[in-house]
């Protein structure tokens, strides 16, 4: 069962949340998903962020909103259990750092592994929880081995990491040696030198800010479409159109990645499967409109594109511009 990379239902205003606040939250989420899901090497897909530990003992986002969890699916329950452990760790400082590992899963539609590393700054009265999310080409067994290696640095962990789902629900406490930073320690375990070069120079933090700059006008353009959606299909289509808009800036998303299946790919699969005349007609209308079209490959150099793109899209290989039909 595939999971949508952009489930735009999550971007609807929460209880007591103003539209402007919901848009700002959506910009952050859309930028994060676009970084993790983009068609780029792992070092270009590091998502960074910060949460704040409130005096009530819960984590809040940069807009001052308490992090709210959705409990709709099995994966939600597993991952939310992990988040509650992260929140408790932030309060109790059970180790220097904490790592959450999500192995690839055909059950949940995750085609690659995801590693999130957390660190705290400040005291109990003003604690920041900084995190970095990495997308890794790891198998389930490689994720388990990595977790065991990290867990060996702290006596707060369970003796056995266990199954992939148990790992998904159980972040790992770890204490790097005093002489090493957390990323220098992980650099010795994860052979991805370009990732650690980005972290060392804080290039990943600057890249996140740039992605938020690109994401904001896209969110503002399509947010009313999300508000007007009535069915799951409408929400999926809104996400597909946002992906297409981002593609016009040269940022392509993977058909399937650590966040799930792209909305464009989901829309295309509905069309291919011919799951009803309305869905098929609707999909055709979206991908053959004046502003967007599904393109298999670059007409100039032949590089695979396989996405819905709009006029003005630039091929990331040859720089050729799609002029539209």
Image (tube, rainbow, N blue to C red):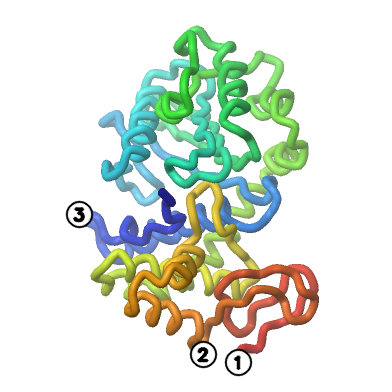
Residue at 39 percent of width and 29 percent of height: 82
The answer for how far apart the CA atoms under marks 3 and 2 are is 37 Å
- Residue 168 on image: x %, y %: 44, 30
Q: Quadrant of residue 111?
A: top right
Q: Which mark is residue 197?
A: none
Looking at the image, tell me whether mark 3 or mark 2 is earlier in sequence order.
3
Mark closer to the observer (3, 2) = 2
The secondary structure type at the circle numbered 3 is: loop
Determine which residue is flagged by label 1. Answer: 325
Q: As displayed, is residue 47 above or below residue 232? A: above
Query: In what element is the residue under mark 2?
Result: loop
**Disc 2: which residue:** 290
Q: In the rendered image, is residue 242 in sight?
A: no
In the displayed structure image, the side of residue 26 where residue 134 appears, left or right: right
Spatial CA span between label 1 and label 3: 43 Å
Contact (Cβ within 8 Å) of mark 2 with mark 1: yes
39 sits left or right of 260 in the view:
right
Q: Which residue is drawn at the image coordinates 43% and 55% (left, top)?
A: 4
Label 1 Cα crowd, 10 Å radius (few <14 / some 14-19 / many 20+): few
The C terminus appears in which quarter of the rendering?
A: bottom right
The total of numbered circles placed on residues is 3
Give SS at disc 1.
loop
Whether 214 is drawn above or below 166: the answer is below
Seen from the viewer's position, the closer of residues 40 and 30 is 40
Q: At x 25% / y 62%, what residue is drawn?
A: 18
Tell me the distance, in whole angstroms, between the alpha carbons under discs 2 and 1. 7 Å
Where 292 falls versus 215 (above or below)?
Answer: below
Sequence-wise first label, 1 or 3: 3
Q: Position of residue 133 (x, y in %)?
A: 55, 40
Q: Please tell me which residue lies in front, 307 or 99.
A: 307
Residue 15: assigned label: 3
Please tell me which of labels 2 and 1 falls first in the chain.
2
């Amino acid at each position: 069962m595939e999971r949508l990379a952009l489930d735009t239902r999550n971007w609807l205003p929460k209880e007591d949340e103003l539209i402007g606040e919901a848009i700002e939250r959506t910009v952050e989420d859309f930028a994060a998903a676009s970084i993790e899901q983009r068609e780029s090497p792992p070092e270009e897909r590091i998502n960074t962020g910060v949460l704040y530990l409130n005096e009530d003992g819960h984590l809040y986002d940069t807009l001052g909103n308490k992090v709210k969890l959705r409990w709709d699916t099995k994966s939600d329950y597993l991952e939310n259990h992990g988040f509650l452990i992260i929140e408790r760790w932030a309060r109790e400082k059970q180790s220097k750092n904490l790592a959450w590992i999500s192995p690839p899963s055909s059950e949940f539609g995750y085609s690659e592994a995801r590693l999130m590393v957390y660190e705290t700054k400040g005291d109990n009265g003003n604690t920041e929880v900084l995190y970095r999310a990495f997308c890794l080409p790891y198998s389930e067994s490689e994720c388990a081995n990595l977790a065991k290696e990290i867990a060996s640095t702290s006596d707060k962990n369970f003796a056995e990491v266990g199954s992939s789902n148990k790992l998904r629900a159980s972040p790992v406490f770890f204490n790097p040696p005093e002489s090493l930073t957390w990323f220098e320690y992980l650099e010795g375990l994860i052979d991805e030198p370009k990732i650690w070069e980005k972290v060392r120079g804080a290039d990943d933090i600057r890249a996140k800010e740039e992605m938020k700059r690109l994401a904001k006008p896209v969110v503002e353009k399509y947010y009313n479409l999300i508000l007007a959606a009535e069915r799951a299909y409408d929400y999926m289509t809104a996400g597909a159109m946002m992906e297409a808009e981002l593609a016009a800036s040269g940022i392509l998303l993977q058909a399937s990645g650590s966040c799930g299946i792209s909305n464009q790919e989901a829309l295309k699969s509905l069309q291919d499967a011919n799951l009803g005349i309305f869905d098929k007609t609707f999909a055709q209308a979206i991908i053959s409109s004046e502003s967007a079209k599904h393109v298999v490959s670059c007409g100039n150099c032949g590089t695979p594109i396989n996405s819905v793109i709009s006029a003005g899209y630039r091929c990331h290989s040859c720089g050729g511009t799609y002029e539209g039909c």
